[in-house]
Image (tube, helix red, strand yellow):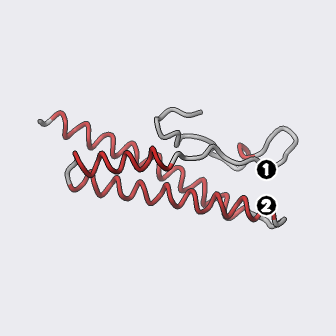
Amino acid sequence: MRDTPTGLRGASSLHALRDASSRPIEPDPIPEEEALQVQVRASIFGSRPVTETAEEFMSKVRGFHVHTTMRVNGQRAGMNSKESTCEMIAYRQQANDLLKKVETLMREELENL
């Protein structure tokens, strides 16, 4: 399901986070190093709006990682991890949306050069 270099677009529902035997599975990771490269490039080559959007994007990537860790740790402890799972999915979607915005802003700036 990966359609970006950062691999952000992935599981989008709670159902998608279970395998055929109904066991919870871990979502595809968001490669933080690649996400950081997006932020770095935006801060070097982009305007203030591009840089700010890239920083917000990176905060959502980090939020995704935090809630993924909470979900996995909760599952290991036998706890209900529904809230962390919902937050993890929300952060992934927000990161996807912000990545699209960064790409659009950078493309628009390049067109105006």
| Residue 14: image location, x then y, percent | 70, 50
Is 46 on the left or on the right of 6, as rendered?
left
Residue under numbered circle 1? 24
Is 24 on the left or on the right of 3, as rendered?
right
Of helix, strand and loop, which one carries label 2?
helix
Q: Residue at x 38, y 58 (%)?
A: 56
Q: Is 84 rendered above or below residue 47?
A: below
| Residue 20: image location, x then y, percent | 84, 38
- Which corner quadrant holds the C terminus? top left
Answer with the quarter of the image where residue 10 lies: top right
Cα distance between the residues tagged 1 and 2? 8 Å
What crowding class fits label 2: few (fewer than 14 Cα within 10 Å), some (14-19), or many (20 or more)?
some
- Which corner quadrant holds the N terminus? top right
Q: Is 48 rendered above or below residue 111?
A: below
Q: Which residue is drawn at 25% across and 36% down?
A: 107
Q: Which residue is drawn at 30% across and 40% down?
A: 104
Asked if the residue under mark 2 is in contact with the one under mark 1, i.e. CB atoms within 8 Å, the reply is: yes
For this orientation, the residue located farthest to the left is: 113
Q: Of callouts 1 and 2, which one flags the residue occurring earlier in the amino acid sequence?
A: 1
Is 76 on the left or on the right of 48, as rendered?
right
- Disc 2 residue type (three-letter): Gln
| Residue 89: image location, x then y, percent | 60, 53
Is 44 on the left or on the right of 75, as rendered?
left
Of helix, strand and loop, which one carries label 1?
loop
Residue under numbered circle 2? 75
Frontmost residue, 59 versus 17 = 59
